[in-house]
Image (cartoon, rainbow, N blue to C red):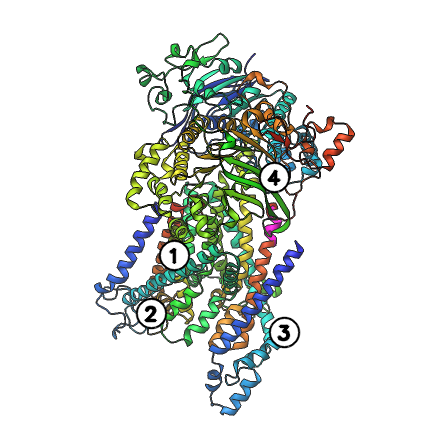
């Protein structure tokens, strides 16, 4: 584990702690309203200030970050899992199954995912979990291609050939020789997908297609404050800053892992 | 090569048709243009709304298959239908495309080129302060979403404007009112355009820069210790020349093809920038149309985006063939 | 005469404390060739890079490198760049990765000229074409516009040489210039290097692991071990009367074409950190060796020096290593009476061939294996030799599939593979096992040695309680310490890894072992040990080998019978003694002639085979060897027409099952 990964993990752990333990330290709940303080800058009573409707920015932002983190993690796990399943199957089976699956991947890549999610998310019932599924459904394709390529190249490795020539069947080859190699690739990809998912979620929420009221995410907090950011910077700064930190931490972990696992492929 | 490109183009066309149809069906099934019409005040009678919707092929009481048939027939004849207000989509589509291209070209190219240079520079001075600074900067920039970046730039620009007392930067729309008719005539108009272009272009350029800086640094590190760079030095080239003429030239191949490929995705990727800076481009149109339930516009923009992605893929193939002799076929 | 290039007291340290070169000194004069010989880890490549000032950034260099008296160490990059490629040139090992893939070779050569001479683009291009002609690239004007990947390995190396001599250098450093090339091409490249040297009069430092290449090429030789020069002297003296135990062992461990027994060096113990680094493998080490690192002392008036504390023991080099006890040939019935374990007849395998990386286009079929017939009987070794691309590995893989081949028949232990069902095939895999060339790639990096050896047992459902004992047994069988069972492959040396590969193949007690270049990736001193192990295992277990290799000397040391492949066909087959002693086919003769022999006197009268290995997708009509055949041009028209029109088949070429496919077996 290299320095970058450690730094990223430490940062992410701190952010998690802040998101889940932080609200306990604040006297304000994220949905409470302080009718004596509208659009106040940070103060002892409201550490990050208040919004125009008198909500505590600290509590609101941390609550939003919690949602963003949860969505990011879930989407990453789902999409990487889907990618792993499709990629390995296509890579191992080859032939028609491979071509059909990869063609489907191409099709989904051509379809603008933002559009589909933006059109579907508001009409489907179910709130943010649906958003998670939709985001995951449009994020796995590139990873699946990568997993497929890795599987194909692993299939050709001499030690896999050696196992086959010893008489090992396909399931044994997959479990003993291919999956352990893919595990590291998938770990890296899942961690990088967390940041992609968080950015996508906040982007959609920014336009109002993602997390919708009464739910709060970093994207919605930023969207609500972006218009008046010049005049009331605190409304915007904390949410934006935390969003940047989260993505930074996750990217550090992912890239650090990749460098540690594959010193040849520094991309 | 030509046969190959044509074949790939045909395969792409099938994908594009499918993707466009899917997008239309999805939009037509999910969006609710009726609500927009009914919300007018005074509330129009139901029959009028229906007639209006029928005229625009937006009526959700018509079966989806019929609406699709009408739409598809139109598209095959080069007609993307009418907008919610009843104007033809085609004309507006072209206008908006030009706006988006005006916005994107400068930013994407400048960002890409700068990113490549910075990435290469970072790789060459690996483990030194330059590398650390560039790498950290690109990491940070990659973590900043476009809509945050745009707002930050706006805040910064307003500070500069306040400090200098001159409106160096402007960030609403493409032109300011009356600039070309002002004291400087057409020249003032140009200056005004440039002034409006600066911030949004910078937003796109910075995002692009971070991406390509990281990518170029990676590919450059791969060739830093390549045998052929060593050979070049053994020939008597200095380190810098060897890295530029042999290392960068080789490391540029995957980056250039990637640039071509991602340029197709940029078309819609600019929606944040357009929306925030009030440029009436394709991205902004798409967002507004989704909100309004303007199915025909959504489908048209999607067709364009799908075509852009596929053309960009094709362009990246051609570029790779042009840059890398190993990828050319029929050699020997 | 003052030396052109003088290196003294050169040290190279890689961070943090890897000492690659520890005080190397040598001098080369104008027109002289110095061979620097060493195995992997001896520091020879670091030495080459240090001389040119091309070491990676983390390396530290001390000492002195003087080119015609001018100190090069410590010069800034700009000053050094004016020397590199002009007065001091280098030829690198792997010419595919050493040439820039995206520039035309003509431009790459021209660049060398333009950097130093400031010639015009056109003049430099013209000169580049001349240089390509000088190094024997046919159709140079056209090929100057080609890219490196369009060249064969040998042709690429010629390009590298052309680049090196472009500015008439004073000295050329060649780092493993012939490694990974076929023997016939190796000989050609060395000839080209010699021509280039004669044209420029440059001094050459030839760095290689190949004692054979040095013997025929160098005037003096320097043997390196663990970063030190342990023996230096005129080639003749060092080869005939080596005095440092390592040199003695290295020369003695080379497989020989005459089949004489080799003496294996004690297997790969790591160099000692203190005292004499070689003492961990040295049979004549004394107590003092553990304390003092010996200095090089003169041992002959010719200037031969050797670094050994026990020079008295090496007075008679032949007595340093024990002569291997002649292994009593196990009592077996005569060959004809033994049943065949493998019988192949008329085996055919064509690969569709594609071109282009971006989009693939089928351009024809490679006739990889085009009808070969052979059999391997119980307890014997058949060596299958040929240049790269001749189809030997394809034949082996086709046999290993244990399925119906596209053409011909394969039967193993009397069972036709075409008739096998799924279960039958799996059962047969117990009896047919394989050892691959690259022990780095053939062992799963995520499994411990014990798990690697247990895998075949698990696959074939050997009871779990017997596994641990069998793993220990296997390790002992291949001469590995039982403690290695807990290691991962990357923690083992190359030789140890290959032993693990062999142990895995033997786990199920197969009757037939297919070996694909099993020692090609190993150092010479380790190679002898593995070959000895293979012979020993055959004697003890009675397993039959099909041994595929490009190295005729290696095959000579293990094979009972030999089959020579060319262009998908077997051109000669017979008992090893007969094939090597009285080769009947001109190709076999040429191959034997191209083998680098570690004997400085053996070079005269050698015939170099023209051209490279043929394009396997386009066999010429008639005899496939005709375009390269040294016999063919000397034939009269009538007999030559026979070669052009009729594809020869294997015909009796002596007694004892010796056969060759040539129309003119009688001709010389």
x and y, in percent, of residue A154 in the image: 45, 48
- Name the chain under label 4: C
Q: Which residue is mark 4?
A: C568
Q: Which residues are magenta?
A: B318-324
Please indicate whether residue C614 sits to the left or right of residue C81 in the image. Answer: right
Residue on which the image places disc 1:
A190
Query: What residue sits right under mark 2 in the picture?
Result: A216
Q: Share a chain, discs 2 and 1?
A: yes
Q: How many marks?
A: 4
In front of the other: C360 or C393:
C393
Q: Give the spatial CA distance, label 3 vs label 4.
A: 56 Å
On the image, numbered disc 3 is attached to which residue? B76
Magenta region, mostly helix, strand or loop?
Answer: helix
Where residue B316 sits, quadrant-wise, is bottom right
Chain to which mark 1 belongs:
A
Please, is residue A200 above or below residue C470 in the view?
Answer: below
């Amino acid at each position: 584990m290299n320095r970058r990964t450690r730094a990223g993990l430490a940062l992410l752990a701190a952010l998690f702690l802040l998101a889940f333990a932080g609200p306990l330290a604040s006297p304000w709940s994220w949905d409470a309203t302080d009718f004596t303080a509208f659009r106040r800058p940070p103060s002892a009573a409201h550490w990050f200030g208040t919004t125009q409707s008198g909500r505590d920015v600290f509590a609101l932002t941390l609550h939003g970050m919690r949602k963003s983190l949860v969505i990011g993690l879930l989407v990453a796990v789902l999409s990487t899992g889907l990618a792993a399943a499709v990629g390995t199957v296509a890579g191992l089976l080859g032939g028609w199954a491979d071509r059909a699956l990869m063609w489907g991947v191409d099709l989904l890549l051509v379809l603008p995912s933002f559009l589909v999610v933006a059109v579907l998310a508001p009409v489907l019932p179910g709130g943010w979990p649906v958003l998670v599924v939709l985001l995951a459904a449009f994020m796995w394709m590139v990873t699946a291609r990568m997993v497929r390529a890795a599987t194909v190249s692993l299939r050709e490795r001499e030690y896999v050939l050696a196992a086959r020539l010893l008489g090992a069947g396909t399931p044994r080859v997959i479990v003993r020789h291919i999956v352990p190699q893919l595990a590291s690739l998938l770990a890296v990809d899942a961690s990088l997908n967390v940041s992609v998912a968080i950015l996508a979620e906040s982007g959609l929420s920014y336009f109002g297609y993602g997390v919708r009221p009464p739910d709060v995410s970093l994207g919605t907090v930023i969207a609500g404050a972006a218009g008046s950011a010049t005049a009331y910077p605190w409304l915007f700064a904390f949410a934006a800053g935390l969003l940047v930190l989260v993505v930074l931490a996750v990217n550090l972990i992912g890239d650090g892992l990749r460098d540690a696992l594959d010193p040849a492929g520094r991309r | 090569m030509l046969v190959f490109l044509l074949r790939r183009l045909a395969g792409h066309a099938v994908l594009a048709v499918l993707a466009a149809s899917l997008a239309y069906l999805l939009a037509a099934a999910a969006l609710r243009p009726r609500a927009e019409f009914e919300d007018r005040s005074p509330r129009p009678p139901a029959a009028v709304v229906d007639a209006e919707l029928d005229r625009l092929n937006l009526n959700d009481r018509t079966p989806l298959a019929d609406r699709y048939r009408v739409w598809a027939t139109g598209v095959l004849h080069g007609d993307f239908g009418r907008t919610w207000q009843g104007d033809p989509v085609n004309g507006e589509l072209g206008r908006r495309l030009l706006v988006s291209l005006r916005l994107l070209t400068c930013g994407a190219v400048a960002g890409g080129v700068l990113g490549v240079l910075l990435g290469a520079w970072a790789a060459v001075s690996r483990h030194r302060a330059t590398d650390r600074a560039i790498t950290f900067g690109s990491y940070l920039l990659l973590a900043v979403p476009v809509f945050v970046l745009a707002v930050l730039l706006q805040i910064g620009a307003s500070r500069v404007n306040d400090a200098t007392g001159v409106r160096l930067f402007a960030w609403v729309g493409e032109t300011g009112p009356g600039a070309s008719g002002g004291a400087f005539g057409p020249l003032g108009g140009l200056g005004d355009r440039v002034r409006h272009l600066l911030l949004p272009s910078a937003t796109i350029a910075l995002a692009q820069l971070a991406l390509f800086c990281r990518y170029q640094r990676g590919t450059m590190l791969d060739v830093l210790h390549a045998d052929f760079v060593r050979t070049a030095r053994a020939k008597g080239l200095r380190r810098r020349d060897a890295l530029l003429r042999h290392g960068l030239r080789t490391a540029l191949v995957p980056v250039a093809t990637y640039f071509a490929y991602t340029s197709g995705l940029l078309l819609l990727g600019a929606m944040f920038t357009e929306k925030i800076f009030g440029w009436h481009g394709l991205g902004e149109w798409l967002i507004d149309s989704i909100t309004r339930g303007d199915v025909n516009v959504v489908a048209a923009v999607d067709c364009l985006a799908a075509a852009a992605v596929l053309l960009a893929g094709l362009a990246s193939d051609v570029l790779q063939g042009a840059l890398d002799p190993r990828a050319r076929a029929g050699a020997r | 005469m003052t030396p052109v290039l003088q290196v003294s007291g050169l040290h190279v340290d890689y961070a943090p404390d890897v000492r690659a070169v520890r005080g190397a000194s040598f001098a080369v004069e104008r027109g002289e060739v110095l061979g620097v010989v060493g195995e992997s880890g001896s520091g020879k490549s670091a030495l080459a890079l240090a001389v040119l000032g091309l070491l990676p950034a983390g390396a530290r260099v001390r000492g002195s490198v003087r080119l015609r008296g001018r100190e090069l160490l410590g010069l800034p990059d700009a000053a050094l760049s004016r020397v590199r490629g002009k007065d001091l040139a280098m030829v690198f090992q792997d010419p595919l990765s050493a040439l820039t893939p995206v520039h035309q070779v003509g431009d790459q050569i021209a660049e060398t000229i333009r950097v130093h001479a400031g010639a015009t683009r056109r003049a430099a291009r013209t000169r580049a074409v001349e240089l390509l002609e000088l190094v024997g690239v046919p159709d140079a004007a056209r090929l100057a516009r080609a890219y490196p990947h369009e060249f064969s390995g040998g042709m690429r190396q010629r390009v590298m040489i052309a680049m090196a001599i472009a500015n008439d250098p004073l000295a050329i450093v060649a780092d493993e210039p012939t490694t990974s090339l076929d023997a016939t091409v190796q000989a050609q490249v060395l000839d080209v290097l010699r021509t280039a040297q004669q044209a420029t009069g440059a001094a050459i430092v030839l760095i290689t692991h190949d004692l054979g290449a040095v013997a025929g090429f160098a005037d003096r030789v320097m043997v390196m071990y663990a970063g030190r020069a342990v023996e230096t002297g005129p080639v003749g003296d060092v080869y005939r009367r080596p005095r440092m135990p390592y040199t003695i062992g290295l020369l003695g461990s080379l497989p020989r074409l005459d089949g004489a027994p080799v003496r294996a060096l004690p297997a790969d113990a790591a160099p000692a950190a203190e005292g004499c680094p070689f003492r961990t493998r040295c049979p004549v080490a004394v107590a003092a060796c553990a304390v003092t690192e010996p200095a090089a002392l003169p041992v002959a008036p010719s200037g031969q020096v050797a670094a050994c504390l026990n020079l008295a023991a090496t007075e008679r080099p032949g007595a340093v290593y024990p002569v291997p006890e002649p292994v009593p040939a196990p009592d077996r019935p005569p060959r004809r009476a033994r049943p065949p374990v493998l019988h192949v007849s008329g085996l055919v395998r064509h690969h569709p061939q594609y071109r282009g990386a971006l989009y693939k286009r089928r351009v024809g079929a490679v006739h990889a294996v085009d009808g070969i017939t052979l059999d391997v009987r119980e307890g014997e070794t058949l060596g299958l030799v040929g240049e790269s691309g001749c189809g030997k590995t394809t034949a082996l893989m086709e046999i290993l599939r244990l399925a119906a081949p596209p053409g011909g028949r394969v039967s193993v232990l009397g069972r036709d593979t075409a008739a096998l069902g799924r279960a039958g095939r799996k059962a047969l895999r117990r009896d047919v096992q394989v050892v691959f060339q690259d022990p780095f790639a053939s062992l799963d990096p995520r499994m411990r040695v014990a798990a690697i050896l247990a895998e075949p047992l698990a696959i074939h459902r050997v009871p779990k309680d017997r596994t641990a004992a069998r793993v220990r047994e296997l390790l002992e069988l291949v001469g590995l310490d039982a403690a290695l069972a807990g290691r991962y492959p990357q923690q083992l040396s190359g030789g140890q890894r290959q032993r693990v590969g062999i142990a895995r193949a033997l786990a199920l007690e197969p009757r037939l072992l297919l070996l694909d270049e099993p020692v090609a990736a190993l150092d010479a001193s380790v190679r002898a040990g593995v070959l000895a192990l293979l012979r020993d295992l055959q004697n003890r277990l009675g397993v039959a080998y099909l041994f595929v290799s490009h190295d005729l000397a290696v095959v000579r040391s293990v094979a009972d019978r030999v089959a020579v492949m060319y262009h998908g066909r077997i051109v000669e087959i017979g008992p090893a003694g007969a094939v090597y002693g009285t080769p009947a086919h001109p190709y076999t003769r040429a191959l034997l002639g191209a083998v680098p022999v570690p004997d400085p006197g053996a070079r005269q009268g050698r015939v170099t085979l023209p051209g490279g290995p043929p394009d396997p997708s386009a066999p010429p009509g008639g005899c496939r060897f005709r375009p390269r055949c040294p016999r063919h041009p000397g034939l009269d028209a009538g007999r030559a027409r026979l070669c052009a029109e009729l594809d020869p088949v294997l015909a009796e070429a002596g007694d004892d099952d010796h056969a060759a496919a040539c129309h003119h077996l009688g001709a010389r």
